[in-house]
Structures are given as structure tokens and as C-alpha cells.
Amino acid sequence: MTARAAVILAAGQGTRMKSPVPKMLHKVGGRTLLDWVIDTVEASGCERIVVVVGNHSPGVRDLVVKRLGEQAVAVQDPPLGTAHAVLAAKEALADFDGDVLVTNGDCPLLRPADLEPLFALRAQGAALSILGFKPADALLYGRLILGADGHLIRIVEPKDATPEELAVKACNAGMYCADRAQMFAWLSRVDNKNAKQEYYITSIVGLATGEEKLVKVAFAPESAVMGCDTPMQLSQAEAIFQTRARAHHLAEGVAMLAPETVHFSWDTKIAAGAQIEQFVVFAPGVSVETGAVIRAFSHLEGAKVGLGALIGPYARLRPGADIGAEAHIGNFVEVKKVKVGEGAKANHLSYLGDGTVGAKANIGAGTIFCNYDGFDKHDTHVGENAFIGSNSALVAPVTIGAGAMTGSGSVITKDVEPDALALERAEQVVKPGWAGRFRAAKLAKRAKK
């Protein structure tokens, strides 16, 4: 098979997003637009990837370096059009021999299956293959003018098109594939004789057909090639992603009472046999095992939920939460960086942060792991079968031994040995009649006014 490389165009300033966050770093399904595209071209078999970035977005460059290394960065400065952007990658691919795919960096819904026909057309003899689509509204897109034999003749921008050409439904998706040497040879001949004085990659179609080279078009669904230039388009892409994710999990055997209310991330893993109730949000990094129930209005991020565990309603699992089999994390309980043992329960109104809870331990309502001293975080460890009384504050670092108990309302600052009872609260004082005298005095004072 011919070797494959990809050039991803990510140098746009994204001004229409109207956001301080660079366009390529906006997210769909909890993953950046650029990460999605890198994932797709990697899965398409591209052994070399070059991402064209601008000096105005150091965060985009940082993402590329972290994922692909410094050699994958090409800088377009100043921005002079799409052909100029691809030419910025010429040096990085100078030693590459094979097909080069050019794609946009803001298409999070693009999949390998959408790109494979471009490589297939190349293998069948096309000198240049282009991805097209048929949008519901073609107003702003360049039209693909095909000959009777189905070969591409030219691309016509809407402002230059005749009424007959405007009626054409096939539009340019802005993705191209050609041999590396041929691609850069065409790009080097593109001129900027246009109103914006920019170098457009669409010009290579005319250069190819002028050489009587075969140019062919493959088509993808409109959703696959949609860019995210505005907040509205970003929200539309998110909606499509969520619809796909819900369909996937339902097909895999995950029960959802109201799937349209459940929100997933790109890497959410839920085993068949799990149940998800209404209005649950899965942020990145969540896995849920079979038999688990995630009840309504819960939010999970960076968390593991074990076999048959019960979460929520109104629970929050933060990064590092590891909930064991058959454990219960109930309403208004927040767990962060705590491993909860098998069968343990924290059913009401608690914060568990940094530490461990042993198997079959019971955490009473209102319990707080006081994990932060203003400078550092410290761990709290609750042993197996321990019982933490309601409204207890466990001041870390502290360990509650296996089978130990704490009295309700206690502030525990020292370790408690196994099977012991720890009490730390003021002795109750009762003053007979005090409340009645207090009310009488207040009423008398008010009557004098």
C-alpha cells in the first residue's frame, strides 16, 4: 500500500468564535477539535502528520508538540491563504514518498471511513482526489463542476458561478489527496491574483486539469465534513456527537430511560447491563461496569464505577474517584481521589476527598474529609466495616481503623484504633427554663416600642 501522510490546517484565527480560546482548542464531546482530526488521520493510516499552526495561538502548537512532537509543527506566518498554509509543511515532508492528505483541523465528526475513498481514488489512478458533500444549503460553498464522465473539471465559488452552476448540489469540503511531489509542485505554481491577494488551494484543480491529469471526487455526509467556525456550529457538532454516542451505548446494551438527556464524552466506557437515569453527565475519563446504576442528575468525571454500584441521584464523582462493586454513593455526595471499597456506603450529604474507604464501611450523613490545610492535601483512611457517625469531620491526615466508630458530630483529629469508639465534642449542658425566659424578655421589649 502507498505510504500516507496528512497535513492538517490549523492556523486560522477563528475570529468568528468570538472567544479568547483558539478555535482548534474548543471541544466536542470533551475533546478538542484538533485532537479529533489527529485521531482520525492516525486511524486512516497516516504515518506522518504535519499540523500547520499560526504564531497567534501558542496553545495549539503546544497541543501538537505534546501529541506528535516538535517535528510535526509547521508555522504559517503571515497567513496568506490555504495553498500558502499547505506549502508551510513542504520542508517537514521533504523526505516523504507517498500520498499526502490535506484536511481541515476543525472537523470533529470526520471519520476514517469518510477519508478512505480519497486514498482509494488515488490507487485507482486519480492524480488528485477531492472530498465533496451535498449540503442542505449550498449558499456559501464552492461548487464542484463535474464532467459527463464524473471527473472534476473545476471548482467555482458562489460569487463567480452562473445560475446553472449555482444549481449544482455537489460542493467542496476542502480536503485533498495527491502524491507528495505532485501536490507541492502544483502548490508552488498557485498565484494570488484575486481580490484578497491570497493563495488558494482550490487553484490546484485547474493546474491538474490543465495538465490533463485525472481529478476525481469522493462524497461524504454533510455532518462528517462540517467545520466549527462559530459557537452555533460548535453546538450543532456537539448535538450530532451526542446523538451518535447515545445510539452507540444503546446498541451496546446500556439501558437509558431518557437517552436524549444523557451527555457523553469521547472516551466514556459503559458496560452492557449498566443503567443510566435521566440528566446524567459523563465528563472525560469515566468507566462504568455492568450492573451499575447511575441515578438522575449525577455528574461523573475521571471516575471508575464498579460492578453493581449505585451512584446518585445528585452525586458528583470527581477525578480519582474509584467506586467498588456494590458500593453506594448517594444524593449530594461528592467523591474526589478516594477509593471506595466493595459494599461501602455514603448515602447522604458528604464530601470524601483524598483517601480510602474500606469495604462495607458506612459513612454517615454530613461527613467531611477535611483534606486541605491551606497549603497541602492530606489523606483520610477509613477501615473496613468502620462506622462514621453523622456530621463527623475527619481532619486529615487521619486513619480510622477497621470496625471503629465515631460518634455523631465529632471532629476527629487523631487516629482511631480498630474496633474503638471515638468521641470528640463538647459535653451537653441543659439550662431549664432558659428558652422560655428568653422569649418572654424579647416579647416584652418589643411591646414597649
Image (cartoon, rainbow, N blue to C red):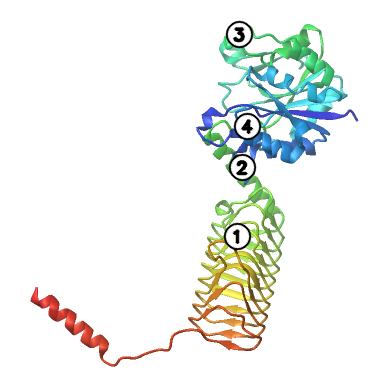
* Residue at numbered disc 4: 226
Above or below — where is 427 with respect to 294? below
Which of the two labelled residues, at mark 2 and mark 1, occupies the earlier sequence position? Answer: 2
Q: CA distance from mark 2 to mark 4?
A: 13 Å
Which of the two labelled residues, at mark 3 and mark 1, occupies the earlier sequence position? Answer: 3
Which of the two labelled residues, at mark 2 and mark 4, occupies the earlier sequence position? Answer: 2
At label 1, counting other C-alpha atoms closer than 10 Å, the crowd grade (few under 14, some 14-19, many 20 or more) is: many
- Say what amino acid the circle numbered 1 marks: Arg
Under tag 4, what secondary structure? loop
Rendered image: mark on residue 28: 2
Above or below — where is 258 with respect to 229? below
Mark 3, mark 1: which one is toward the viewer?
Answer: 1
Under tag 1, what secondary structure? loop
Q: Position of residue 42 (x, y in %)?
A: 78, 37
At label 3, counting other C-alpha atoms closer than 10 Å, the crowd grade (few under 14, some 14-19, many 20 or more) is: few
Rendered image: mark on residue 318: 1
At label 2, counting other C-alpha atoms closer than 10 Å, the crowd grade (few under 14, some 14-19, many 20 or more) is: many
Q: Specify whether residue 153 is in view.
A: no
Which of the two labelled residues, at mark 3 and mark 2, occupies the earlier sequence position? Answer: 2
Q: CA distance from mark 4 to mark 1?
A: 33 Å
Which residue shows up at 53% across the image and 62% down it? 374
Above or below — where is 337 with respect to 417? above
- For this rendering, which residue is in front, 353 or 346? 353
